Amino acid sequence: MNELTILSTTDVHGFLTAAGEKGGIDALSAVADQFHEPILIDNGDFFVGSPETTFFNTTQKISPLTDLANELGFDVMVPGNHDFDYGLPFLKRQVAAFKGKYLCANVLDMTDQLVFEPYTILERNSVKVGIIGVITSAMPQIADYEKIKNLKFMDVIETLKKWVPIVREQADLVIISYHGGIERNMIDGSPTQYDTGEDQAYRIIDEVPFIDGLICGHQHRQNAGILKETAFVQPGYRANVIGQLTFRFTDRLQERQAALIETENATAISLSDPTAFEQWLQTKVDLSHFEEYVARKVPGTFYALALKGATVADFLASFTPPYMLSTYHVSSEEIKAILKTQTISGIQLVDGQLVPQQSDYRITTNLKALFPAYRLETNYIFNVFDEYLALISQQEMK
C-alpha cells in the first residue's frame, strides 16, 4: 500500500521557539525525517509577528526567515493576513527568494490578474498531489487599507469552486491550504462564532466537493479530524504542533488520517547577530505620528496612549499581545476619576467640568488596567508594533 504524508505549520509568526520556549519550527526537520518524502506546507503568517522578524523586516531586503523556509525544505507556502503588513513589494521579495511554490488563488491585482500562482501539482510515491492556496477573504476587514488597497481578495468559496475541479482533473489528491479558521463545530456543524466571513473552514468542506485534505489556521488553535471524508488539521501557533495528513492508496485512495504532532524536543535557532539585534532594540523610534496612526486604525474615539519610552524595546513593551489596543465606553464620572492620573487626548477637566462635556465617552487605549473591565467594548488584534515601525521604515527609505 502506498502512503503519502503532508506535514504543515501555520501562524509561526517568525518565532523560533514555541510558546514557553519548548518546541518550535526547528522540530519540523526531525518530524519530517520520520516519514518517506513528506510534502511540507506552511499555511501563512510566517514572516511577521515577533520582535526579531520586525528587526529583519525593517533592516534587510530578504528576511532570514525566507532562508530558513528554504533550509527546512518547505514545498509550498501560502500568505497569511500579517504577511501583507509590510506591503506587497516586501512579500514579493520573499516569494522571489523562496525556492518552493508560493500559492494563493484568491488574491488579484486591480487588473484582475492573479498575484501568485493559484495551485501546484507535486508528485510523491507515484501519487499526484494538487495543492491550492487561499487566504481569508475578510482581508479588507482585518488588514490595513494602505497595505492592500491595490489588491482584491476574492470570495474563498467561489474561488475554490472554480479551481478544485481544474486541479481534480490533474491530481490523485486535492489539498487546500487555507489561511483562515474554523467557524463551526466540526462534528455537529453548530456555529461557534458569528459568521463574518473571516473563518470558513467548515463551509469549505461542506460546500466544495472533491477536497481530500484541508489545512487551516489563523485562530492559533489546534484541531484535527475527518469531516465528510475530508481530513483537516489546524496546527496551532508558533509550530507548537505540526499538522499531519496521511493518505494510503492501493489502486485508489483507501484511507485518510489527520493528526497533530507535538514539537517539545525542538532546539532554539538563532538567525541574527545578537549584538545587532540588541542594538536595534535600543534605537530611537519617531513616535510623533503614533496617535495619528491609531486614529486611522480606530477612528471616532478619544485616545489614551502611554508609551514606556522612545526606543524600539520600550515601544514593544508598551503593548500586551494579542490585544494591543482596546476601546472602552465609559461614563463622564468615570472619565473624571481617570483624568486625575492619566491624560486623555482631546478631553480636559477644567474647574471640575469636562471639556468637551458629554454623558459618555469612547476611549481607545493600550492602558487596559486603567479602565473598568466591565466597560470594555472592543479588543483589536492589530499588529500595531509591526505596522507602525513598517510605516516609519518606509518613510525613511523614501
Image (cartoon, rainbow, N blue to C red):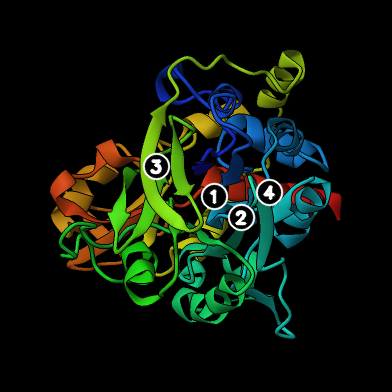
Mark 1 is surrounded, within 10 Å at the Cα level, by few (under 14), some (14 to 19) or many (20 or more) other residues, namely many
Q: Which residue is mark 4?
A: 390
**What's the CA distance linking mark 1 and mark 3?**
20 Å
Q: Residue at x 36, y 67 (%)?
A: 205
Q: Nearer the viewer, residue 254 or 367?
A: 254
Q: Residue 98: x percent and y percent?
A: 78, 46
Mark 4 or mark 3: name the one nearer the start of the chain: 3
Q: Nearer the viewer, residue 349 or 234?
A: 234
Q: Is residue 289 left or right of residue 214?
A: right
Q: Which residue is mark 2?
A: 78
Mark 1 or mark 3: name the one nearer the start of the chain: 1
Q: Is residue 161 left or right of residue 79?
A: left
Q: Quadrant of residue 50?
A: top right
Q: Is residue 231 left or right of residue 266?
A: left
Q: Which residue is mark 1?
A: 43
Amino acid type indicated by mark 2: Val
Q: Nearer the viewer, residue 359 or 115?
A: 115
Amino acid type indicated by mark 3: Pro
Q: Nearer the viewer, mark 4 or mark 2?
A: 2
Mark 2 is surrounded, within 10 Å at the Cα level, by few (under 14), some (14 to 19) or many (20 or more) other residues, namely many
Q: Residue at x 75, y 36 (%)?
A: 70
Q: Residue at x 71, y 66 (%)?
A: 117
Q: State the quadrant of the C terminus.
A: bottom right
Q: Which residue is mark 3?
A: 322
Mark 3 is surrounded, within 10 Å at the Cα level, by few (under 14), some (14 to 19) or many (20 or more) other residues, namely few
The answer to the question of whether label 4 and label 2 lie on touching residues, with beta carbons closer than 8 A, is no
Q: Quick one: SS at disc 3?
A: loop
